[in-house]
Image (cartoon, grey):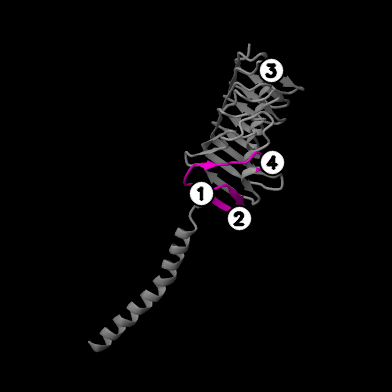
Amino acid sequence: MRKSAVFFKIVLALGIINLAPVAAVQADEQEEGPFKIEKCQTISQQGSYKLVNNLTFTSSSGTCLTITANFVTIDLAGFTISNPGFPLPGNSTLAIAAANDTTGVTVRNGSISGFGFGVELEGRGSVVEGVRVGFPCPCEVGIAATGIVRSNIVDIASAPSGSVGISATGLVSGNYVFMTRSTGMAIGQGSTVIGNTVTGTGPFPAIGLLIACPSNVTNNTAVNNLGQNLVLNGSGCNDTNNVAP
């Protein structure tokens, strides 16, 4: 009987020792959840980030969120990044930017207003989805990325002449672009462009959809753009079921 009791105590002790590392790992995993973003900053570490409040940028130059690391995901979580003090043409500010030496950067689920450039991800393998870049916005470019650009809304009615709503190469789908002053969407060669809507570019002669061929251009709507609704540059584009009178 005494041996059984001693054996039970030993087993119990070993169980506690074995569980301790597991608990420590679980605690570390909880601590490594999405990093909170509470203010404009430079993001230099790989990982997931999440806004916990609206961000206000109060400068006539510079960038609110600068990304210098690879494989960074930013969830705007429904919040807005705004630059309310400088809504003027020629505004060179950026809301979110990553240089061309980065890769695998994702931005999703929120709004941007008041910047010269909304989201500018120069590296490859980028994702921009569920982002609204809107008025007031003197944007030169609403969204620029190489990778996947989908389900975004760009409304930059106060933009200067020469502005572009979306400049992208890759999979570009389900976006809505309204009231740019030069080009609604400028798409690079080798892209798949599906189910986008572009309308109201102007008041200067403007282009709704400008596509570099060869690309797959399917089921898009480009109407009421002053100038041309759809321009395919080069040869080899698959132009199918597009509404672009």
Residue placed at 38% from the left, 78% from the top?
Answer: 14
Judged from this view, the residue extending furthest toward the top is: 245
Residue placed under numbered mark 3 in the picture: 206
Viewer-closest of 211 and 145: 145
Q: CA distance from mark 1 to mark 3?
A: 39 Å
SS of the residue at dot 3?
strand
Residue annotated with mark 4: 122
52 horizontally vs 186: left or right: left
Q: Mark 2 = which residue?
A: 45
Determine the residue located farthest toward the bottom in the rendered image. Answer: 2
Q: Position of residue 189 (x, y in %)?
A: 72, 30
Q: Amino acid at mark 2?
A: Gln
Magenta stretch, residue numbers: 38-62
Q: Nearer the viewer, mark 2 or mark 1?
A: 1
Up the image or down, 26 lies above or below 163; here it is: below
Q: Residues within 10 Å of mark 4 (few under 14, many from 20)?
A: many
Q: CA distance from mark 1 to mark 4?
A: 24 Å
Label 2: state its secondary structure. Answer: loop
Q: Nearer the viewer, mark 1 or mark 3?
A: 1
Instruction: Please indicate whether residue 205 sits to the left or right of residue 153 in the image.
Output: right
Task: Tell me residue 57's x, y (percent).
Answer: 58, 41
Is label 3 or label 4 in front? 3
Would you say 217 lies left or right of 74 here?
right
Q: At which x and y percent is residue 63? A: 64, 43
Mark 2 surroundings: few (<14), some (14-19) or many (≥20) residues within 10 A:
few
Q: Is residue 24 above or below residue 168?
A: below
Task: State the separation of the CA atoms marked 4 and 2.
Answer: 18 Å
